[in-house]
Image (spheres, rainbow, N blue to C red):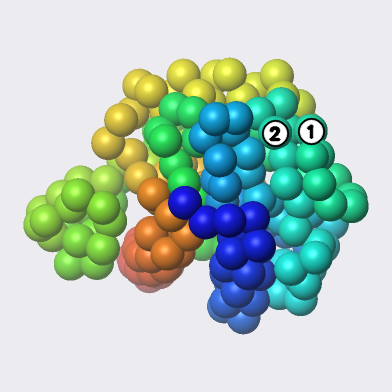
Amino acid sequence: MPSFREAAALLCDLGRACQGRGWVQGTSGNFSAVTSREPLRLAITPSGGDKGSLAEGEILEIDAEARVVSGRGRPSAEAVLHLALARARGAGAVAHTHSVWSTLLSEAHAGEGGLSIAGYEMLKGLAGVTTHAHREWLPIVENTQDWPTASGAVEEMLRREPEAHAFLIRRHGLYTWGRDVPEARRHLEVLEFLLEVTGRQAWRS
């Protein structure tokens, strides 16, 4: 488990990488890493900042109630989702992007309750997946301006879908996670690739 300082450096690097690929335009997206389990503490990016130009000193530390323990500024209201993932999945890091393809597909498949992706070699980049024949189900949840209230339902969904490596928020973006920042970053790269392939294929037909 990284120290807060180590986590801050990793999150800033991840933010730069994602901004460079167009996944966190403007002030969108947020990233976190667990720095302690007992008590639960997360290093997390602040709300309203350009994730491509964050300095390590801007990273916040929050507790299990999403209260700021150290740092200036405030976390996104979605910090409660990062905490839900740390609890329900034991995630060591969480990545949230607002890419074009995740946003478009979250709307296109909202009526189905999720998006299924299968048959691609790239799926083997997800933890525990050993064959391209794997079927990955990405649940889609409705967007809200009240995540503190809605986070309980998201946590229940995560427990109902133990095989999922990610979920989509309708007209909003992608959430994925991993045991640490490198794994969360790998999952993000794999899933953004798969979402773009899925989207391009659908729009071509």
Lateral position of residue 124 relative to residue 79, left or right: left
What's the amino acid at mark 2?
Asp
Q: Nearer the viewer, residue 141 or 80?
A: 80
Q: Furthest residue to the bottom?
A: 20
Tell me where residue 46 appears, x and y as whole percent: 78, 54
Tell me where residue 48 appears, x and y as whole percent: 84, 56
Name the quarter where the C terminus is drawn: bottom left
Tell me where residue 26 appears, x and y as whole percent: 78, 67
Check whether the beta carbons of the residues at disc 1 and disc 2 lie within 8 A of each other: yes
What's the amino acid at mark 1?
Arg
Q: Indicate the secondary structure of the residue bearing disc 2.
A: loop
Q: Nearer the viewer, residue 192 or 43?
A: 43
Instruction: Report the residue at 42% width, 64% height from top.
Output: 182
- Residue 41 visible from this viewpoint: yes
CA gap between label 1 and label 2 equals 5 Å
Q: Quadrant of residue 183?
A: bottom left
Instruction: Report the residue at 76% width, 27% height from top.
Output: 146
Q: Indicate the secondary structure of the residue bearing disc 1.
A: loop
Q: Quadrant of residue 159?
A: top left
Tell me where residue 95 appears, x and y as whole percent: 54, 54
* Residue corresponding to mark 2: 63
Q: Quadrant of residue 68?
A: top right
Instruction: Report the residue at 27% width, 46% height from top.
Output: 136
- Residue 199 visible from this viewpoint: no
Residue 130 disc label: none
| Residue density around tag 1, few if under 14, some if 14–19, many if 20 or more, within 10 Å | some
Lateral position of residue 117 relative to residue 89, left or right: left
* Residue corresponding to mark 1: 67
